[in-house]
Structure formats: structure tokens, C-alpha cells
Amino acid sequence: MADLFSDERFCEFLSKIDAQDAAKFKLSQVEDEHYDIYEFYGGVYAFLSKWESNEEIAAFFLVVGDDKAMLIDTGMGGGDIPQMIFRLIEDKELVVVYTHEHFDHIAFAGYFENEYMINVEESIERVNAGFTSDELSISRVRTDSPYPLEEGRATSAANIKPIEDGTVFELGNRTVKAIHTPGHSPASTCYYDEKYGLLFVGDIFASSTIYIHFDDDFFLKSDLDTFVQSLEKLMPYVHKSKYIYFTHPSVADKADKLVLLKDAVEEVRAGKVAYDIVHDELSQSDVKCYKTHGLNILVSLNND
Ligand SMILES: [Zn+2]
């Protein structure tokens, strides 16, 4: 247990949740050279890479049902994720779903059989094509792979199939529903686990900075109005949910954080919040930075 509680990423979440739920959290018995594997509330595994600092983490999740398991995103590269996942689920059938098309969520696309993303053609085409090393030359990305790749390629080509908004996956004694929630990116999708009241929100929420500022061929386009509409659409699920699981960087929080986010972005959209113009290294562009409700929110200069 000493190891468990010395991990600041995990401690941060434990500090936010109910004591009876916190008592259920543990490091998995299955160990991996590259990832810390935690068992979270609701029979969920969270994978946090050992080499990244707290600010750089791109967590991803595994939901295990009686018959099938669902992997939600495949991280930003490094290690051998397929091997790690199949050690955990053994002979259960696996489905892989993606919260969106960004490079730090899809590095192992193409190494699994049943992979799905919401039906946004440009996003699926983007991921199925795979990324070259040049495209991923921005910092923080692991372009080494345990599997053979053609020279100059950083990720495999994939065969991700489209799913419709509202698709329900039956995992055996639990279901997970896909809810299309664009705004951060065109394909952004939340996954709702009704049995345990969990929402997997991808990059719609982050405990560091919330990105609604992308506007290029690599990240595709964010949109503030669409982001607000998606949060409105999500509210019935938020009200039924206990926790949200997200990617960057502290992994999880109480679900009502999305109500706070909705209030914040509505005020931003209404022009009620002052902003600074800052340079964003990731998109290599100047963007508006809003600080409100304890959140940092980046919006494109073009999004008025
Ligand atoms: Zn993203």
C-alpha cells in the first residue's frame, strides 16, 4: 500500500472521493514494466505510464464485464499495451473504443481486432491512416513500438469501424453507451456506464487545461458553441453519474465537475470572462486563455 499512496496522481483522486469508495482502490496484482495499473471504482482499470510526469500523463481505461471487456483509448505509445490488456482479461472478448481522434489516445490503434469510433468520417480516416514519425515530432510522444512498423511510421494503419451516437455495448452484467459530444474535436465521445454511474469523458474535462482551441489538419477543429451543446446533452448522464474518468492528468473526479465546466464555458461564450492571449506549444498558435471557476480553458482566436 505504501507504493499506492506515494503516487501523487492516485492520491489526488482518492482525496476527492467518498471514503467507502476510496477503500476499494488498489494497485492491480498484474504488474507491467511500463504502466502502473490501478483498479478504480466500478471494476475499472486505469493505466498510467511510469515514464511521464504528472503533467504529461495520458491515462486510458479498461471496463470489465462478465463476458466482454472494453478498452477506452490506447494511450500515446510506449510499452506493449495489447500484451498487457490480454494478461488482465485473459480469454474474455475485447472491444476497443476511442474517445476521439487525437494522437495521444490512439497510439495502439491497429493492434486490436474490434475497434470503434463515432461515425465522423474525417476522424476515422485520420486514425485509420496512422501517423508518421514526422507528424508526431512534437514533444512528449513515444514513437518507439514493440511491433514492426514501416520506416518513418510512428503508428500502425488501423481498421476502426464507425458507431452511431447512442450505441450500447453489452459487456455482460453491465452496458456502456456511446454519447457523441463534439467540441474539443469532431469525434469526441463520452462513454456512460449505467451500472456504476461512470462517465468516461476523454478530453472534454481535464484537471490541468481544457482545450477548445484546435483548428488545423492535425488536431482537426474545436468549436466552443458545439462544446457547450455537448455539455447540455451530457447533463442527464452527469446527474446520474458518480465519477468522471478523464485523461489529463489526475484521471478522475466527481461527476459534478462537468456542471462547473458547463457554467464556465457558458460564461466564456457569453463574453462574461476576461482572457489573456497566450502561446500554445501543442498547436503552435496564439489562443485565448480563460481562467474561471477554478478551470483553465483555451479557445481559438477565431472562435468568436
Ligand atoms: Zn484531445
Image (cartoon, grey):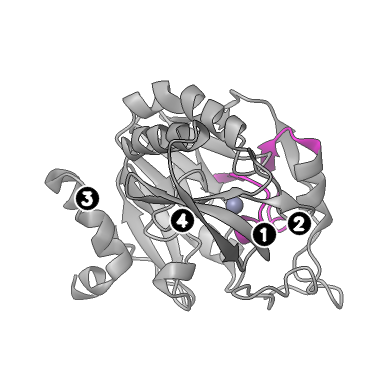
Residue 138, horizontal then vertical, whole percent: 68, 73
Q: Which residues are magenta?
A: 93-121
Is the N terminus in the top left, top right, bottom left or bottom right quadrant?
A: bottom left
Q: CA distance from mark 1 to mark 2?
A: 9 Å
Regarding residue 270, the answer to whether it shows in the image is yes
Q: CA distance from mark 4 to mark 2?
A: 19 Å
> Which numbered tag is attached to residue 231?
none
Give the residue drawn at x 32%, y 42%.
42
First of labels 3, 4 by sequence position: 3
Q: CA distance from mark 3 to mark 2?
A: 35 Å
Is residue 183 rendered to the left or right of residue 24?
right
> Which numbered tag is attached to residue 218?
2
Q: Is residue 176 above or below residue 15?
A: above
First of labels 3, 2 by sequence position: 3
Residue behind label 1 places its C-beta within 8 angstroms of ligand 1: no
First of labels 4, 2 by sequence position: 4
Which residue in the structure is indicated by mark 4? Answer: 209
